Amino acid sequence: MNELILLKRGKGKTTRLLKECAKNSEKNIYTYFVCADTNEAIRVAEEAQKLKLIINFPLTYDEFLKRNVMSGITVNYYIDDVDMLLSHLAGRMRIT
């Protein structure tokens, strides 16, 4: 399912994504939380732990972009601050 969660800053987007990610992890569905950088990944992992949610350690945007797609395996990605990911992508693009 593709879904965008559009809420203002500090209104619970990350927590909602964490809960969805953990719920699918419990169902043995490959899930990854994706966030801006290593510091944010550590913060998100700590938040998940405080909420007693079990998730894989979050990927950074760069790790997400470098991942090889494994054939035959469905992977759900929960991307936090997708607008920042798009900006990150734009910064990496070379337009000639």
Image (tube, rainbow, N blue to C red):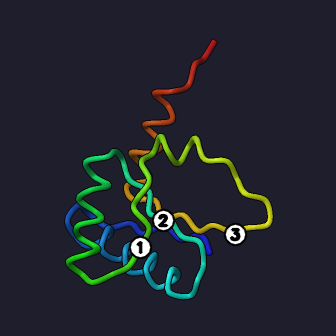
Horizontal and vertical percent position of residue 19: 38, 80
Horizontal and vertical percent position of residue 77: 54, 63
Q: Which residue was labeled with disc 1?
A: 55
* Mark 1 touches mark 2? (CB < 8 Å): no
Horizontal and vertical percent position of residue 72: 79, 66
Question: Which callout, 1 or 2, points at the residue further toward the start of the chain?
Answer: 1
The mark total stands at 3
Question: Is the C terminus in the top left, top right, bottom left or bottom right quadrant?
Answer: top right
In terms of depth relative to the viewer, which is nearer, 79 or 39?
39
Q: Which three-letter amino acid code belongs to the residue tagged 2?
A: Tyr
In terms of depth relative to the viewer, which is nearer, 3 or 65?
65
Question: Of discs 1 and 2, which sits in the foreground?
Answer: 1
Mark 1 residue element: loop
Q: Residue at (44%, 36%) from the top-left corner?
A: 88
* Vertical relation: 80 (above or below) 90: below
Q: Residue at (58%, 19%) from the top-left corner?
A: 94
Horizontal and vertical percent position of residue 55: 41, 73
Left or right: where does residue 83 sit relative to residue 77? left
Question: Of discs 2 and 3, which sits in the foreground?
Answer: 3
Q: CA distance from mark 2 to mark 3?
A: 13 Å
Q: Which three-letter amino acid code belongs to the residue tagged 3?
A: Thr
The tag on residue 74 is 3
Q: CA distance from mark 1 to mark 2?
A: 11 Å
